[in-house]
Image: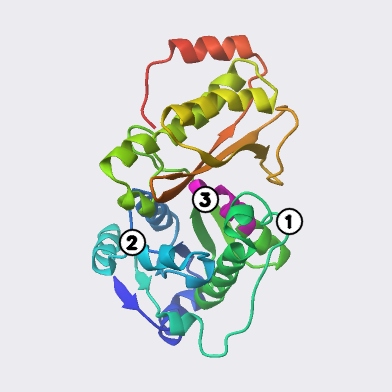
Amino acid sequence: MNLVTTVAELRAVLREPQRAGRTIGLVPTMGAFHEGHLSLMRRARAECDVVVVSLFVNPSQFNDAADLIGYPRDAERDAARASDIGVHYLFAPAVEEVYPPGFATTVSVGGLTDTLEGRHRGRAHFDGVTTVVTKLFNMVGPDVAYFGQKDAQQALVIRRLVRDLDMPVRIEVCPTIREPDGLALSSRNAHLSPDDRARAAALHRALDAVQRAVAAGERDPAAARLPALAALRAAQIEPEYLELVSTRTLVPVDRIDGEILAVVAARVGATRLIDNRLIQPSPNPDREVATVATAAPTTA
């Protein structure tokens, strides 16, 4: 694996594979790699001729200076893990390389960024995401870019960005990777105390509660949320939001008539976590309930 730190060097090493028509895959990250990141790298490695992983803690998407300062960092460990998977290039630029003096451009996606994370973290959060992703796409020129379903709103925003600006890159959204108790893997999990780590699994239990309610035939979003809220309360967690939203617009649904997205965000101790689950109502609720009841237990 090669470590690259400047845009000029990155473009130079990618010039030959681009000219040869080789498929280039990009995995954008902020480092502190866990199995979720590694699963994206493996997917890219299996599907692409050349894999570039970016490692850049993007300051413009943080609305809290303390959160930026405390964000987990372990560049040496990250490099070793990416190398083990067979990543070809680890692109780890300095802040000044991405945002040179006088930088004054923002790429902004409207609508999808106004709700959920945008409402709680501020519009500037997604402006920071879409601006840095646009820059990464311009720097790397990937054919495919890989994102995780855990950040569902971000993935939807990136898809809209690519569509609206006619960017020649395919977006692949890969499944959320979870701990055995269902907690979605996140770099921020490292900040959880042992007690908070145990409580954090309630986010996944809350999403499961929504799924069970819908599987049992519940079509009223307010009613479907009740057991999920109860699961959070039992763990002494107060959500910032727990919503059932459209998978296209992220607007809360009035009735569960098709596939929806259950989304949750909450602070567990001092650590802010998010999670989501795609939920598809069964056309035959009684049959689905019977299937769930007789199925063998599995881990996420």
Front label number (2 vs 3): 2
User: Which residue in the protein does label 1 denote?
Assistant: 111
Residue 25 appears anywhere in the view: yes
Q: Give the label on residue 151, or none.
A: 3
Q: Residue furthest bottom?
A: 101
Going from N to C along the chain, the mark reached first, 2 or 3, is 2
Q: Give SS at disc 1.
A: loop
Q: Is residue 268 magenta?
A: no
Amino acid carrying mark 1 in the image: Gly
Going from N to C along the chain, the mark reached first, 1 or 2, is 2
Task: Give the residue at x 49% y 43%.
Answer: 266
**Number of numbered markers:** 3
Amino acid carrying mark 3 in the image: Asp
As displayed, is residue 216 above or below residue 298?
A: above
Q: Give SS at disc 2.
A: loop
Q: Is residue 154 magenta?
A: yes
**Residue 227's quadrant in the figure?**
top right
Q: Is the residue under label 3 in contact with that under label 1 (CB below 8 Å)? A: no
Marks 1/3: CA distance?
17 Å
> Residue 235: x, y in percent?
41, 31
User: Which residue in the protein does label 2 denote?
Assistant: 72
Q: Give SS at disc 3.
A: helix
For the record, the magenta segment spans 148-157
Q: What secondary structure prevails in the magenta region?
A: helix
